[in-house]
Image (cartoon, rainbow, N blue to C red):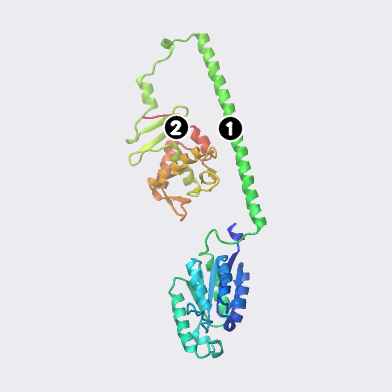
Amino acid sequence: MANKRKFSIFISSTYEDLIDERQALVGVALESNFIPVGMEQFHAAPTSQWNVITKMIDECDLYLLIIGGRYGTIEEETGISYTEKEYNYAKNKKLPVLVLIKDPLSIIESKKDTGKDKFDKMKKLEDFREKVTHDGNTVDFFKDLNDLKYKASATFKNALEYVDENAGWVRYRDVMDIINEEIGGRNKENDEFKEYKNKNLEDMKEMLSQFGSRLTDLENNQLTFEKIPTVTEEDIEKLFQDENDMSIIRNKEVDKPIVGQDNVGYIPPDSALLLVYAADGDGRIIKIRTTSSPTQIFTSGKQFMADNSKRESARWVEALDRLIEWKWVKPVGYKGEIFELTGTGYDKADWLKETMRIDTSKNPLDELKEFENFIYV
């Protein structure tokens, strides 16, 4: 989506002395994938046309100011030029402001203010230059048309870093492509979820069937409690052991230990698996938040959610939060969506993988099933 956006930019300046410069900037803007917006027809606009100017600025994503050798027509009410008034309006609207200033030594006399008030305008122009230069704007200077095109090209390129992420214009067909692509992805997720539920249902039916058969066997054989073998101390020692003062939890089905450490206590299996799979991949964990669906957790191209429910989302978000709290992962994106393993995180991941005997070639949810029935020590 981002690479298909076009941004509109309002070009503001005095008119007669900068006709060539404005035309050159329109060309550079189009080449840089921007939509140039100008008010040439209102360069000496009366107050009645101010609403038109402000409306056009409101609809733009950026504001570009060019300062040459003239201060321009002064509005009687405010005592400032319309160009400076446009600049003040753009700043108040918090638009990203780009400024290109022509080197005063490169300006010929015919391109400067004339008339009885020229000295007053020269002073106002100098103050205006000083103001925009120290007003937190992106400012560059040029000497002639060729220099202007060169500087403007770099200015437009850098401007993309300042544009609001929700700004810009997109073709209707591009928007529909994105929407259809997302709908297709959602349909695929729904189909996979239905398949997952059906499989679980079949597994449950099979488990109930086996349980019923076992009950029948018990009734037929008339087993009593006295005939059930007792557990010896040796059996318990084989099941549990103490290693390096670490608390051990063992899975009763496959005897895979789920471990804790003295510096964080018990490590839940979901946090352990998330860390190990990230370490065996690119070392990153991605948290995707949208307004239309619960937060999702990914790493190494694998989604750590059995379904798209809020309950499942909360489980894996908490698993990530634990890793952040223990300083085993750290945020690297300014939006809090990308996290990377720390050096300690890699060490812990290696230790967990070996101790818990995690096989990262398997689907993480399949591995997680092997840790569902554990005994705490």
Observer-nearest residue: 85 or 250?
A: 85
Q: Where 59 falls versus 329 (above or below)?
A: below
Question: Please, is residue 269 above or below residue 347 in the view?
Answer: above
Quarter where residue 376 is shown:
top left
The mark found on residue 256 in the picture is 2
Q: Mark 1 or mark 2, which is nearer to you?
A: 1
Query: Would residue 359 be visible to someone looking at this image?
Result: no
Residue pictured at 42% horizontal, 37% vertical: 268
Q: Amino acid at mark 2?
A: Lys
Q: Which one is nearer the viewer's eye here, 265 or 89?
A: 89
Residue at (53, 9) in percent of width and height: 220
Q: Position of residue 176 (x, y in %)?
A: 65, 53
* 350 is higher (above) or lower (below) than 227: below
Q: Say what amino acid the circle numbered 1 marks.
A: Lys
How many residues crowd mark 2 within 10 Å: few (<14), some (14–19), many (20+)?
Answer: some
Relative horizontal placement of residue 66, taking residue 126 as reference (left or right): right
Q: Which quadrant is home to the N terminus?
A: bottom right
Dot 1 or dot 2: first in sequence order is 1
State how far apart marks 1 and 2 are (Cα). Answer: 26 Å
The secondary structure type at the circle numbered 1 is helix
From the viewer's side, name the closer residue of 138 and 9: 9
Q: Which residue is mark 1?
A: 197
Q: Residue at x 37, y 23 (%)?
A: 236
Mark 1: give few (<14), some (14-19) or many (20+) Cα within 10 Å: some
The quarter of the picture where residue 46 lies is bottom right
Tell whether label 2 touches label 1 (CB within 8 Å).
no
In the rendered view, does 206 fall on the left or right side of 285?
right
